[in-house]
Image (spheres, coloured by chain):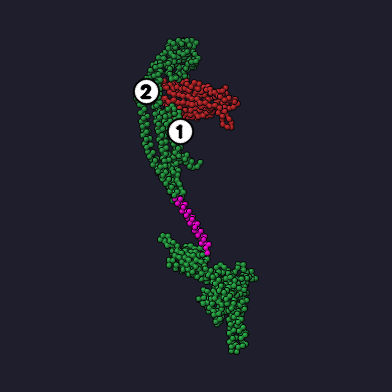
Amino acid sequence: MLLLAWSGAVGAEFSITDISAKLTEGALVINGALELDLSDKAEEALSKGIPLEIKIHVHLQKHRNIIWNKQVGNWVLRHKIRYHALSGQYLVSGHETDPDHVESFTALQEALKSMGALDELTLPILDALAAQDKYLVRIRANLDIETLPAPLRPVAYTSPSWHLNSGWTTWTITQ
Amino acid sequence: MDDNTVSRYVAGITPLSILSVLLFIALIMMSAATQNSALFGHLYSLLLVINIIGIVVLLALILLNLYKLLVQFRARVMGSRLTLRLLGMFVVLAVIPVTVVFFFSIQALNRGIDSWFDVKVERAMDDALMLGRTAFDALKQDLVQTAQEMSIELEDTSDRLAPTALNYLREKYNVFEITLFTQDGKILASSGQEGPETESLVPVRPGEAILSQIRQGLTYANLDPLSDGELNLRVVVPVYALEVGAPVRILQVLQQLPNRYAKLGESVQSAFAEYEKLVYLRGPLKFGFILTLSIVALLTLLIAVSGAMFAARRLVTPIRDLAEGTEAVAQGNYRKQLPIPSQDEFGILVKSFNEMTQKIHRAQTQIRQSQQETELQRTYLETILAHLSSGVMSFDPQLRVQTHNSIATQILGIDLQPGQKKSLRWLERSYPHIAPFAESISNAMENGQAEWQVQVLLQSQTTRKTLIIRGTLLPGTGARAGGYVVVFDDVTALIQAQRDAAWGEVARRLAHEIKNPLTPIQLSAERIRHKCMAQLEKNAQSTVDRSTRTIIDQVESLKSMVNAFSEYARPVQMQRQPVDLNQLIQDVTELYNNEPLRPGHRRRALDITLTLDNELPAITADPGRLRQVLHNLLLNAGDALANTNKPLLRINTRCSTVNGGHYVELQILDNGPGFADGLMDRLFEPYVSSKEKGTGLGLAIVKKIIEEHNGFLYAENLKQGGASITVCLPLNEDATLSGKGESVLKPASTHSMKERKA
């Protein structure tokens, strides 16, 4: 079953406060929501047609008491948001099941909420997991500066407004 | 890895060139990336980091080299000053143009980017967008009206009949897709052009916000961009139920825009989006270009500085090498060879330097060899001189002693070492007994004789030496006159030996020639006396008696003389044994006690005073020969005192040390008239005598016996009158005084002296 154990999220604008994870047969299923609030600079850039890409890193680790945890699997989910000026809508793409599917939202917050929603996110696990072991899920969401236009990258790297990062949060799975 | 290798890797031109080329490639890629090039866009940050690292590395290399250069400058390393000067010049030459180009480029860049944007264009873009929106709004309004009509028609349609109704309505109103949802967004029915109610085509579900909006009774109408870039018009309206309490349903109508509209709309959208993006990126783009330009300028500058360092060092290296080489040569290192840097003028210069040092080295080697040969010859000569039996001295033109050998010291009996570089006059003043030697040399030199030979006699208190001196004028060098080399031999022994041999021969012949007729003469005289005496008258008898007696006496006298000669010429047959000289003296003087010294002498009292050293050690000698020495000396003294009123004879013995040798000294003094001045030089030669009688061999035999005992003797006249003869007999170190076992000799003055009248 799942256990919610938030071990503290850090980050300026992004945060992860509610995650539930469970292990099913050959898959990790995650439910929860990432709070993705853009900074003013990022919002302005988005409204000016700069697409933003948000990366969600998911690490599955086997807990070990004495030495460091062993990584069992890791996944990177990419969600892209851009503003369509003609329709005045925010277009979100990068859904895990259909990356090409574009979803349009009239409001930015709605679009961000959609991007941060993890509804029955199912991530396949290749290795067999032992039932008696304790497993952890580490999740982090951040704005991928490298996907910004090249001229913007030096500015983004040097400006805190562009450093949108939730930091790693660890969630325990108890079976 | 040694310092040179590290230095080559750090400061060499090859790593610098490779680094420069790599950085320029990275710069070109970065420049392309700045303009959003698809090829390098994703590498932009990496390229930026690479370039910054490259700049840092270059800067570090330059600073390291600069630090080393400054350290060398402070340590006053040869060439560092010139390197710094050249480096400064090169850097100034590089920095000024790069700086000028940089600032003008920045200005041009700013102006160029600003010129991309125009208010009119911006307004036109806004207008185009507005126009597009307006056009689509009209279509949207039409579709809203159609959707509302459909909604009214569907109000009384049950969920079960909804698909049919939707198909009907879709065909009636000619729309792309109609979908009926429940209040919470579940699909009730749908109809699309590609195939209604097919499972493969799931209708697009409106978002929660739209549903919420509809639930509030509002209408949603908007353009929906699709993933393939197409545009759909989406209208969502509530479908109210006629029955009271029945739930409100939601109708979504999708209509594809006409192809022409869609293309125009997409074109306006993409152009507007690009323009907006460009406007937004104006600042970052400028920053990016300025950053790239700055990196280019900095990189160019740093590479130029590195190149300047390399060039300065390369230019200075041969000059520094030459300077170091010259210094080394100045300090005497003629083996210095410099590496030839290139085939240019520097190379020719270095080659010439190397040839010069080689020649100097060869010349130096030859000089050294010559010096060694000269030294060898000098050593050879010195060895020969040291082992010569002749004394050798050389003088400079000012008669200063230049060199001498050890034999010269021995022959002259003086220490010549303090006299080195001193004048001949100084030697003469310091050692008066060599005055004849010094005078003969200075006379010869004053006369300018090139070759000369002279015999001189050196006489000191104890010795008397005859030297043969040969001088040669040394050749001068140029205007300088040469000195003199003087070779001299001590021929005293030679002359003495010659004299002794001559007198031995004389004595032998005399003995032979005289002795033979003496016996017949004596016999004849005796026969005349015996046969004729009786037959003669008394007067004649008396005459014959006196005559024959005279003959017989004279013959006897002649026989004595001949025997003396024989004694002198007799070969040495020494019978050495320990002799107590004091005892011997006492024995011999006892014989003369109250006896005339010589037959015929008138009997008179002769005081013989003995002052004998009781501590006198025994000597190894022939006692018989020494006895004869004492007899001869006493007889000689007795003869000298024959006409003295109060004759006194004194015999002293003592130990003495002469020239480091230990002797037993016997001295006989009298108060007679002394030796005649003319005889002093040849007193001990045979047949030299001032007496009317005597053989003239007494002192000669004394000298001969003393010399046979390796001793020496000398005679001198006393100031208070009278004469003395001193005999020195060598004393063996192991000689002991009989019965006392003493072996260490002490000065006579410390010994108890026994004096008595003999």
Q: Which residue is mark 1?
A: B49
Position of residue B363 in the picture relative to residue B753 (left or right): left
Residue located 52% across and 60% down the image: B383
Query: Chief secondary structure of the magenta span?
Result: helix
Q: Nearer the viewer, residue B189 or A75?
A: A75
Q: Nearer the viewer, residue B31 or A99?
A: B31
Say which element carries label 1: helix
Is circle 1 on the same chain as circle 2? yes
Instruction: Give the amino acid at mark 2.
Output: Met
Q: CA distance from mark 1 to mark 2?
A: 37 Å
Vertically, is B3 above or below B583? above
Give the label on residue B125, or none. 2
Q: Position of residue B400 (x, y in %)?
A: 45, 64
Tell which tag, 1 or 2, sits nearer the viewer: 1
Assign a secondary structure to mark 2.
helix
Chain coloured red in this rendering: A
- Classify mark 1: residues with Cα within 10 Å, few (<14), some (14-19) or many (20+): few
Q: Is residue B362 magenta?
A: yes
Q: Residue at x 62, y 67 (%)?
A: B734
**Magenta range:** B360-389
Q: What's under tag 1, amino acid-wise?
A: Val
